[in-house]
Image (spheres, helix red, strand yellow):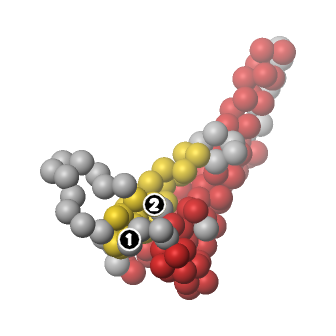
Amino acid sequence: MTSDSGSTRQDTEYVRHIQEALHELHQLQQTPRLVTSPDELEALECEIRQRTDRLGSLLVGYHLQQALDSAALQAEQERLVKQWPKPLKNDGKVKVRVRTAQGDTVPVWVTYYRRKGQRRAGKRSTGVYAGLVV
């Protein structure tokens, strides 16, 4: 389970990765490459696309994490959990990887709710990431 400091650490990590991606793109802008063949042009375009896709994915992850941590979404999660057909227990926040439309995966911390009752040894109980459902 994470605390508020865990959320802050995640936010700081996102900001650092976003700044690194922006720096890489700035370096591409500052040092023009001499492109003399179609293959070189294609390679340059592919590199730029990969870096901009990564930046876009990081920004999506950052905004998704902000939404998951918001009071409004927390209230919606609680409402969903209370209406669930079987009683659910808050099992704390866990790190999950979400695949963005660009195809990259980004980590987010989301609350996992599982069914109440005894857990089978070594097996994960049936549950739900309510924040991702909402």
Q: Badge 1: few (under 14), some or many (20 or more) residues near its Cα, within 10 Å?
A: some
Q: Quadrant of residue 90?
A: bottom left
x and y percentages locating residue 111 in the rendered image: 42, 68
Mark number, residue 128: 2
61 or 93: nearer the viewer: 93
**Residue 59 versus residue 9 in the image, above or below:** above
**Residue 94 versus residue 46 in the image, above or below:** below
Q: Residue at x 69, y 42 (%)?
A: 102
x and y percentages locating residue 8 in the rendered image: 44, 75
Q: Residue at x 44, y 54 (%)?
A: 96
x and y percentages locating residue 132 in the rendered image: 56, 62
Helix, strand or loop at label 1? It is: strand
Amino acid type assigned to the residue bearing label 2 in the image: Val
Lateral position of residue 123 relative to residue 25, left or right? left
Lateral position of residue 87 relative to residue 76, left or right? left
Q: Are marks 2 and 1 in contact (CB under 8 Å)?
A: yes
Q: Of discs 2 and 1, which sits in the foreground? A: 1
Q: CA distance from mark 2 to mark 1?
A: 9 Å
Q: Residue at x 36, y 55 (%)?
A: 126
Amino acid type assigned to the residue bearing label 1 in the image: Leu
Helix, strand or loop at label 2? It is: strand
Residue bearing mark 1: 88
Quarter of the image with the C terminus in it: bottom right
